[in-house]
Image (cartoon, rainbow, N blue to C red):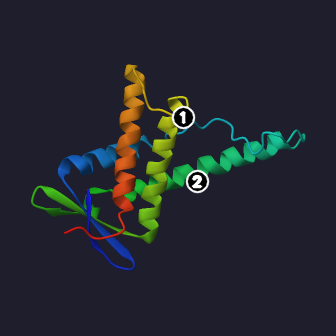
């Protein structure tokens, strides 16, 4: 995936078919991070803390549901311009931000599933899968954040 054109409001990326398929597969995995209870504070022992955490968890779940819907809509087949065997994806600021949030959630979720290691030395099959997904999400995040056009 590489940036081929950028204006003040739009970014256009060139992806080969494999990259397009992988990106869509990653977005379909969202939300990746657990939907367990959100903890607003580690030190708040106020009786209302549980209620606030429940509201926070519900809000996050709703936000993720909306993000997934937006991300899948911007990756529909009709959003891709075909160029031979490859694809061009044009994003505006909002859709680019949505895609970055989704990819970051996947990357961070994989890191958490690995136990939040400082070093990514993961020998198990399950661990290798999380590391692979984490690195793919990171690849697409970095591609989206490229500051300049590539020729």
Residue drawn at point x = 48 percent, y = 49 percent: 104
Question: Which residue is most to the bottom?
Answer: 8
Tag 2, which secondary structure? helix
Q: Earlier in the sequence, mark 2 or mark 1?
A: 2
Closest to the observer, 147 or 7: 147
Tag 1, which secondary structure? helix
Q: Where is residue 118 in the image (x, y as percent from the top left)?
A: 52, 34
Q: Residue 63 carries which label?
A: 2
- CA separation, marks 2 and 1? 20 Å
Figure quadrant of the C terminus: bottom left
75, above or below 57, in the image: below
Question: Which residue is most to the left?
Answer: 84
Question: Which residue is most to the front?
Answer: 119
Q: Where is residue 5 in the image (x, y as percent from the top left)?
A: 26, 73
From where the camera sits, is residue 70 visible? no
Figure quadrant of the N terminus: bottom left
99, above or below 49, in the image: below
Q: Would you identify the image quadrant in which residue 86 lies?
A: bottom left
Q: Residue 112 carries which label?
A: 1
* Mark 2: few/some/many CA within 10 Å (<14, 14-19, 20+): few
Residue drawn at point x = 31 percent, y = 56 percent: 76
Q: Position of residue 149 (x, y in %)?
A: 27, 70
Task: Tell me if label 2 and label 1 are in contact, CB under 8 Å.
Answer: no
Question: Which residue is most to the right?
Answer: 47
Q: Position of residue 72 (x, y in %)?
A: 39, 53
Which label sits in the foreground, 2 or 1? 1
Q: Would you identify the image quadrant in which residue 44 lies?
A: top right
In the displayed structure image, the side of residue 6 where residue 113 appears, left or right: right
Residue drawn at point x = 69 percent, y = 41 percent: 38
In the displayed structure image, the side of residue 150 where residue 40 appears, left or right: right
């Amino acid at each position: 995936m590489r940036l081929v054109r950028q204006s003040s409001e739009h970014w256009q990326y060139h992806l080969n078919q494999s990259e397009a398929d992988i990106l869509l597969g990653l977005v379909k995995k969202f939300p990746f991070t657990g939907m367990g209870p959100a903890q607003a504070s580690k030190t708040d022992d106020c009786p209302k803390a549980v209620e606030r955490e429940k509201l926070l968890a519900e809000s996050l779940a709703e936000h993720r549901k909306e993000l997934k819907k937006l991300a899948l809509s911007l990756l529909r087949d009709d959003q891709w311009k075909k160029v031979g065997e490859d694809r061009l994806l044009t994003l505006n600021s909002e859709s680019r931000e949505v895609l970055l949030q989704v990819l970051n959630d996947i990357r961070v979720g994989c890191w958490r599933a690995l136990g939040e290691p400082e070093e990514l030395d993961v020998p198990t099959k399950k661990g290798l899968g999380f590391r692979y997904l984490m690195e793919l999400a990171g690849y697409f995040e970095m591609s989206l954040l490229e500051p300049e056009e590539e020729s």
